Image (cartoon, rainbow, N blue to C red):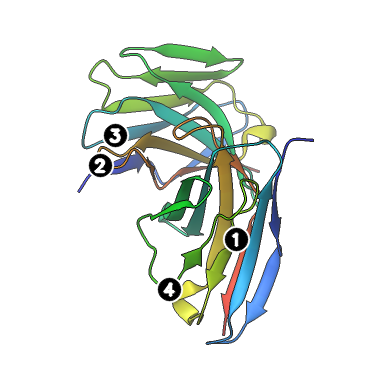
Amino acid sequence: GQQVMQIPQYQHVQEGEDFTTYCNSSTTLSNIQWYKQRPGGHPVFLIQLVKSGEVKKQKRLTFQFGEAKKNSSLHITATQTTDVGTYFCAGPRDSNYQLIWGAGTKLIIKP
Amino acid sequence: EAQVTQNPRYLITVTGKKLTVTCSQNMNHEYMSWYRQDPGLGLRQIYYSMNVEVTDKGDVPEGYKVSRKEKRNFPLILESPSPNQTSLYFCASSLERNEKLFFGSGTQLSVL
């Protein structure tokens, strides 16, 4: 069945280092959404990408949607403690247009 | 304040004792959904509703029921909870399907 894979599962970084999470779909997606979940919190919408090859920036966060619309990435430049949390991607399923979610990448800042 | 309100925040129960988790949104959203979150598995959809009186199964509907009698409310019912339903549950809503989702604060359920 349709799958959305997200890697890595965890990433440990020193504060100030960069962070990247990758999302790969088994099928072409009409759009992809990214969410952030802080520890103990709920997912919060970050952005939606729709166009092939789209790149969007939010301050230190850069989101990309692949040319084939099957992969996406989130890159954070110079991580800060406020970036800690789990980042999820999600795209609509072909069969019923419900979102199918990646398993998330947990960003951990090394002390 | 625009929000999705979910209650209770924490719930410990025993096998077989019926329970309801309430969800209410004040944004006049058409679309509502329930998810469960388990470590390493991300968010899995339980049920969703496109509008009042319209509900449909998600990926993991077994053991759950929902209703959408009013636009703002979308309760999740566990008729006979079992330990494998121990999980973190989230209600979410959006203006329309595939628009950005607004999540409730979550319900941590433990079934003993």
Whether the residues at callouts 2 and 3 have beta carbons within 8 Å, the answer is: no
**Left or right: B67, with A111 as reference point:** left
Instruction: State the CA–CA distance, disc 2 to disc 3.
Output: 18 Å
Disc 1 to disc 4: CB gap under 8 Å: no
Q: Are marks 1 and 3 on the same chain?
A: no
Discs 2 and 4 share one subunit:
no
For label 2, the residue is A95
Which amino acid type is shown beneath numbered disc 4? Gly
Q: Chain of mark 3?
A: A
What's under tag 3, amino acid-wise?
A: Asn
What x and y, as percent, mark residue A83? 62, 33
Which residue corresponds to mark 3? Answer: A24
User: What's the amino acid at mark 1?
Assistant: Pro
Asked if residue A39 can be seen in this view, the reply is: yes
Q: Residue at x 45, y 20 (%)?
A: A63
* Image position of B106 with respect to A11: above or below: below
Mark 1 and mark 4: Cα distance apart in space: 14 Å
Looking at the image, which is closer to me, B22 or B110? Answer: B22
